[in-house]
Each structure stands twice: as C-alpha cells, then as structure tokens.
C-alpha cells in the first residue's frame, strides 16, 4: 500500500465517524472552526496574569507560530494538494472552505506551535493544551478539510518551531528589555506591579 493510499484510507476512517455518529458532528465543527477563539482567549489570560514567566511564554509561542507558518509556506511550495472534499467522493464535508492548498494544515501548525510552547514551560496544564491541539487536528479531518498527512506535518512543524523558540527566546535578552518597557507603560494605565513567578529561563 502506498503512502498516498494510506493517507486516504485513514482519512476515510476518521471522516466516516461523523456519518455513523452524527451527534459528534457539532463537536467536530466547534473544534475545527471555533476552538481557535478559545486558544486566543487562553493566551490573553496567560498574558494578563502579569507574570514574567507567562508573558515570555506567550512571546515564545507567538514567535513559534511565525516561524512555523514560514516553514509551512515553504513546505507547501514543494508539495501541494487540494482539500479531501475537492478530490474525493462521498466526503462528510461539515464546514464551508475554499478550495486551495491543504498541505500542511495551518490549524495544526498554529495549535501545536502554541500548545507545545505552553507544555514546554507549564507542563501541568500543558498536557491539556496538547490534548486540545490533537482534538483540533482530528476535527479538521472529521469535517473533511484535511488529510491526516496535512495534520501530522503541521503538528511536526509546530513542534520543531516551538522547540527552536524555547531554546532561542531566552538568549534574546532584548525581548525582556522590550517587555520591561511595555510593563512600565502598562503600569501607568493599569497600576500594580507585574508578578514575578521566578526568572524566565529555558527549562
């Protein structure tokens, strides 16, 4: 069996779940389309806890996404294909989506870059965020807009980018300087000293 056929077979196995268990369709749609807003809300909560550790973690996460998206665009220029609903018959298509290059999955890139960045710094709740990222990846297959290969590649790119930024960000001392300047301005608008939850470091 070729890798391409395996990709299709696994897609069918996951995508057909919604045909058998239609009660799962709303969950898949929410995870695939709207969980990104929950992710953004979570990032804002981390930021406004006003701890250096959480804020540097969010900076690390955002830079990981930027790097991951660049790598994803490069990967997409070497290999591309349309969404499964545009290439295969009898796909359980649950959301509207333009027909364009589906490789790799942008949702997987974003979720895994951010969620793995959180896990690297805050492992206790990081496991929950990684579970969310996995659920989003699976949901993108369930709604018919990505093959498993798209999701796995996006996840791998997200992981690599998060690791690189986890190593690099603590070495970029100017980021902490910029954060200090931001917090001085913030302090004039929102009085109260930002909390120190231990010196941010690569760990």
Image: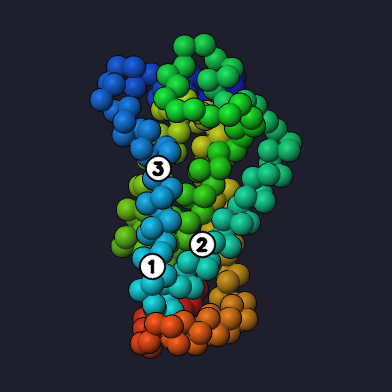
Element class at badge 2: helix
- In the figure, 63 relative to 7: above or below? below
Q: CA distance from mark 2 to mark 3?
A: 19 Å
- In the figure, 58 relative to 199: above or below? above
Element class at badge 3: loop
Say which label, 2 or 3, has the lower sequence index: 3
Give the labeled residue for mark 3.
34
Instruction: Say which of marks 2 and 3 sits in front.
Output: 3
Element class at badge 1: helix
Give the labeled residue for mark 1.
46
| Quadrant that contains the N terminus | top right
Foreground residue among 8 and 182: 182
Within-10-Å neighbours for mark 2: few <14, some 14–19, many 20+: many
Q: CA distance from mark 1 to mark 2?
A: 11 Å
Residue that appears at 50% across and 43% down: 108
Q: Which mark is residue 61?
A: 2
């Amino acid at each position: 069996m070729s890798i391409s056929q395996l990709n299709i077979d696994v897609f069918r196995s996951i995508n057909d779940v919604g045909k058998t268990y239609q009660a799962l369709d709303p969950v898949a749609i929410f995870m695939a389309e709207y969980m990104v807003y929950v992710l953004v809300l979570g990032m804002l909560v981390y930021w406004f806890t006003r701890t250096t550790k959480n804020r540097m973690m969010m900076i690390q996460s955002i830079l990981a996404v930027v790097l991951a998206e660049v790598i994803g665009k490069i990967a997409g220029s070497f290999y591309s294909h349309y969404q499964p609903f545009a290439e295969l018959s009898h796909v359980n298509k649950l959301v509207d989506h333009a027909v364009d290059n589906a490789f790799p999955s942008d949702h997987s890139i974003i979720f895994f870059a951010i969620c793995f960045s959180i896990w690297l710094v805050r492992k206790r709740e990081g496991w929950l965020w990684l579970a969310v990222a996995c659920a989003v990846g699976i949901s993108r297959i369930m709604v018919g807009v990505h093959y498993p290969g798209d999701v796995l590649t996006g996840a791998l790119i997200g992981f690599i980018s998060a690791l690189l930024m986890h190593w690099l960000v603590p070495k970029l001392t100017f980021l902490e300087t910029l954060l200090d300047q931001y917090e001085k301005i913030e302090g004039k608008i929102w009085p109260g000293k930002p909390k120190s939850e231990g010196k941010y470091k690569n760990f």
